[in-house]
Image (cartoon, rainbow, N blue to C red):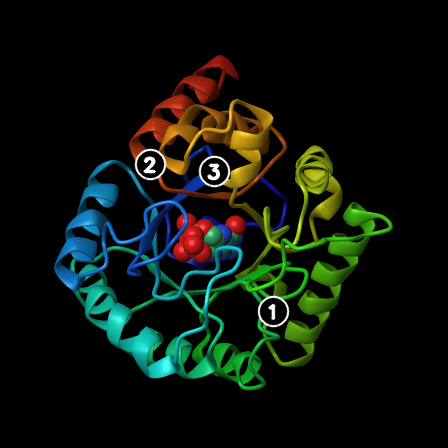
């Protein structure tokens, strides 16, 4: 765990291992599970099963950010996720909303979401900083190069670790200037968002260098394409073992939150890893 991270600020009890954020995509087209939980009822059932499997946080998104994904309207996004957020928050689970739109953040927080997860690090909508500042909610700031529609066409950096680290530090400073203190922020290198396999590996090897003082660190590598590229070209549901390898690596490097699709499998691996560390 990083020095600045307090699970209580994110509504969670200390776990002695990274917190697990279970992914719920209420979308027809997500890369990993597109269409599987596209109705509210299916998404709510999936959220309950992730919580039963040991998720600490349920991350609910209504817009796919997979490479090449088409944008949808805020109204469409809200219609997909709000009933799901209301039901799962009503059950007492800690819910985060995965959105880049301030209007959707505001509506989600009003329906019981407690955390804002933004792949644009609160830079994609000019009202996001104010909405998060006013709400008092914690937020996750992720790095992305470009836009989902084109980000994987030709990602380019001179020094990916330095550039992603500088971006995250700058966004934390922008949050501080807007009245959002570091203790309620997590930074995230944005694995797969405008990055080649080599960029993803460089970032994962340098996780401690990407931390921003006073903030937590989140890693989301679950089922992503680079895992198949490093192995035998497996499809997203076949990338669970590789995802667990990244999760254990990130845990050892001090990650505070892991965003994963396969909660039961990751949790079992983490509990055994933790016992082997002598913390068990
Ligand atoms: N990855 C995805 C979406 N949101 N948020 C954070 N903070 N970090 C991530 O790495 C991250 C994220 C992409 O995964 P998924 O939600 O499964 O796919 P899609 O965007 O196609 O719905």
Q: Please give the label number shown on residue 86.
A: none
Kindly identify the residue that appears in the image at 76 percent across and 43 percent down.
209
Q: Real-space Cα distance between discs 1 and 2?
A: 30 Å
Q: Which residue is mark 2?
A: 263
Q: Residue furthest right?
A: 158
Q: Residue 87: x and y, percent?
A: 16, 64
Mark 3 secondary-structure assignment: loop
Per the rendering, the mark at residue 181 is: 1
Q: Which residue is mark 3?
A: 18
Residue 115 position in % (x across, y down): 41, 64
| Mark 2 or 3: the one toward you | 2
Mark 3 vs mark 1, foreground winner is 3
Q: Residue 106 sits in which quadrant?
A: bottom left
Residue in the picture at 81% in, 52% down: 157
Sequence-first tag of 3 and 1 = 3
Q: Position of residue 217 (x, y in %)?
A: 59, 48
Please state if 181 lies on the left or on the right of 13 as rendered: right
Q: Nearer the viewer, residue 243 or 239?
A: 239
Tell me the element at label 2: helix
Whether the residue carrying mark 3 lies under 8 Å from ligand 1 is answered with: no
Crowd rating for badge 1 (residues with CA inside 10 Å; few <14, some 14–19, many 20+): some
Please indicate whether residue 99 sits to the left or right of residue 215 in the image: left
Q: Quadrant of the C terminus?
A: top left
Residue 165, placed above or below residue 261: below
Question: In terms of sequence position, does the residue under pointer 2 or pointer 3 come before the other?
Answer: 3
Badge 1 marks a residue whose secondary structure is: loop
| Picture quadrant where residue 120 is located | bottom right
Q: Nearer the viewer, residue 4 or 239?
A: 239
Say whether mark 2 is within 8 Å of ligand 1. no
Q: CA distance from mark 3 to mark 1?
A: 21 Å
Instruction: Give the image quarter of residue 44.
Output: bottom left
The correct choice, above or below, for 236 with respect to 59 in the image is above
């Amino acid at each position: 765990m990083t020095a600045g991270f307090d699970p209580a600020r994110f509504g969670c009890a200390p776990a002695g291992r990274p917190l697990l954020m279970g992914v719920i995509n209420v979308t027809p087209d997500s890369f990993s599970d597109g269409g599987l939980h596209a109705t509210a009822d299916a998404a709510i059932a999936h959220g309950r099963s992730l919580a039963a499997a040991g998720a600490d946080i349920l991350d609910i998104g209504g817009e796919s950010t997979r490479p090449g994904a088409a944008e949808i309207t805020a109204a469409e996004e809200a219609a997909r996720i709000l009933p799901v957020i209301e039901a799962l928050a009503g059950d007492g689970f800690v819910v985060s909303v995965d959105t880049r739109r301030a209007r959707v953040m505001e509506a989600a927080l009003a329906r019981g979401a407690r955390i804002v997860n933004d792949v644009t690090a609160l830079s994609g909508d000019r009202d996001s900083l104010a909405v998060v500042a006013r709400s008092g909610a914690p937020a996750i700031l992720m790095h992305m190069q470009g836009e989902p529609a084109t980000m994987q066409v030709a990602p380019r950096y001179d020094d990916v670790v330095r550039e992603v680290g500088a971006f995250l530090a700058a966004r934390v400073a922008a949050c501080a200037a807007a009245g959002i203190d570091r203790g309620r922020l997590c930074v995230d290198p944005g694995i797969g968002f405008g990055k080649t396999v080599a960029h993803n590996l460089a970032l994962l090897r340098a996780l401690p260098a990407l931390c921003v003082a006073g903030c937590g660190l989140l890693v989301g590598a679950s089922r992503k394409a680079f895992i198949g590229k490093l192995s035998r070209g497996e499809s997203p549901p076949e990338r669970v073992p590789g995802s667990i390898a990244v999760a254990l690596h990130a845990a050892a490097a001090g990650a505070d939150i892991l965003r994963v699709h396969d909660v039961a499998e990751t949790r079992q691996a983490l509990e055994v890893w933790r016992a082997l560390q002598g913390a068990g």
